[in-house]
Amino acid sequence: NAGVTQTPKFRILKIGQSMTLQCTQDMNHNYMYWYRQDPGMGLKLIYYSVGAGITDKGEVPNGYNVSRSTTEDFPLRLELAAPSQTSVYFCASSQVLGRSYEKLFFGSGTQLSVL
Amino acid sequence: KNEVEQSPQNLTAQEGEFITINCSYSVGISALHWLQQHPGGGIVSLFMLSSGKKKHGRLIATINIQEKHSSLHITASHPRDSAVYICAVIIQGAQKLVFGQGTRLTINP
């Protein structure tokens, strides 16, 4: 199993450009998450999904959009990149059944710079 | 005040010392995760707890639901344990994760 795969690993954008960060998991997990980690800071939740077709906002959703058309894929879209979106982005997944929670699995991260 | 607070924020110790990292939270939770982030940036899940205690090698995690507190212990610490340790809780009914700010651990040889 590959686990959680994120692409690209690095990207530089100009202000106003758009891009999609890809995230795929092959563990059939129902829960998927997008986080950002600013330099020296903790992780902040951008969006999450509890299953295909269902997404919800986290702490810092402004400037981002997500979709979850399949169990495996959870892409994160930046429509109009701004310098404040310079950060490291992590995708994660987990299996949750009722009150039973399993470990989180993280992608390797995407380092994004907006100049 | 953050919903999840970790202490200490930074911890430096000598190889072999017993390490304790604390996590307190102010909300009802369904479960709590302990994560490890190495200097290269990758994040690995160490434990997922909803009650009691778990042990894996030299790592032990405990949780007290009534006191809204969890601890991560490392026995016989080693320089390779140097990393940022992060506590994250799943808020009851909200199904989303909230993270502590992390504890930066440095183990000197």
Image: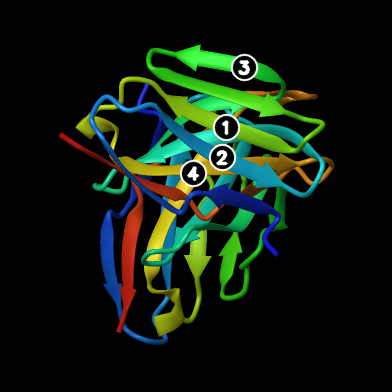
Q: Residue at x 48, y 81 (%)?
A: A80
Q: Which residue is mark 1?
A: B71
SS at mark 1 in the image: strand
Task: Specify whether disc 2 shares its chain with disc 3.
Answer: yes
Question: Disc 1 versus disc 4: distance between alpha carbons?
Answer: 11 Å
Figure coloring: rainbow
Indicate the position of residue A74 as horizontal and vertical percent values.
54, 47
Label 3 close to label 4 by CB (< 8 Å):
no
Label 2 close to label 1 by CB (< 8 Å):
yes
Question: Disc 2 versus disc 1: distance between alpha carbons?
Answer: 5 Å
Which disc is residue B86 wearing? 4
Question: Disc 2 versus disc 3: distance between alpha carbons?
Answer: 14 Å
Label 2 close to label 3 by CB (< 8 Å):
no
Q: Residue at x 51, y 30 (%)?
A: B72
**Callout 2 amino acid:** Asn
Task: Specify whether disc 1 shares its chain with disc 4.
Answer: yes
Report the mark closest to the observer, 1 or 4.
1
Parent chain of label 4: B
Q: Which residue is mark 3?
A: B53
Q: Residue at x 61, y 68 (%)?
A: A60
Q: Which residue is mark 2?
A: B22
Question: Disc 4 versus disc 2: distance between alpha carbons?
Answer: 10 Å
Parent chain of label 2: B
Disc 4: CA contacts within 10 A as few (<14), some (14-19) or many (>=20): many
Indicate the position of residue A52 as horizontal and vertical percent values.
67, 40
Q: Is A104 positioned to the left or the right of B81 in the image? A: right
Identify the mark nearer the N-term, 1 or 4: 1
Question: Disc 3 versus disc 4: distance between alpha carbons?
Answer: 17 Å
Identify the mark nearer the N-term, 1 or 3: 3
Identify the mark nearer the N-term, 4 or 2: 2
Parent chain of label 3: B
